[in-house]
Image (cartoon, rainbow, N blue to C red):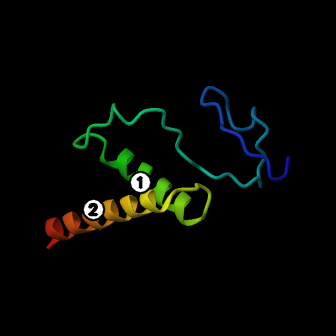
Amino acid sequence: CVGCVWWLVSSLSIMEQGVREYDLLKLRFKFYSFYDLNPRLDSIRINQIYEQAKWSLLSGEIDCTEEEALMFAALQVRYYHIMFKILY
């Protein structure tokens, strides 16, 4: 189905779900809860959530208020500030 969007089921192979050799897949993460994240153990998952949120906002996939956009921008600036201090 051209242009169809659905979540893949992890218990089935991708071919069992109708995905063929030259089909385009957009890999995304589906998170139900962020409460189980531990910054020391889950830094990769946290970064994946952040990048997915960032690109979803920038591409217009997700609508947000101006206040939410400003909060996200502030978090991004804070993150880069911390990383700069760690690296330099």
* Residue with the mark numbered 1: 50
- Position of residue 73 relative to residue 88, above or below, is above
User: Residue 13 falls in which quadrant of the image?
Assistant: top right
- Position of residue 42 relative to residue 67, above or below, is above
Task: Locate residue 24, reporting x and y percent.
Answer: 72, 55
Numbered tag placed on residue 39 in the rendering: none
Amino acid type, label 2: Tyr
* Residue with the mark numbered 2: 79
User: Residue 82 falls in which quadrant of the image?
Assistant: bottom left
Name which residue lies at 33% across and 31% down. Answer: 36
Q: Find numbered disc 1 in the image and state the secondary structure of the residue it sits on.
A: helix
Task: State the residue lying farthest toward the bottom.
Answer: 88
- Position of residue 55 relative to residue 39, above or below, is below
Amino acid type, label 1: Tyr
Task: Locate residue 73, reporting x and y percent.
Answer: 37, 65
Task: Locate residue 80, reporting x and y percent.
Answer: 27, 67
Q: Are marks 1 and 2 in contact (CB under 8 Å)?
A: yes
68 to the left or right of 81: right
81 to the left or right of 44: left
Name which residue lies at 48% across and 54% down. Answer: 53
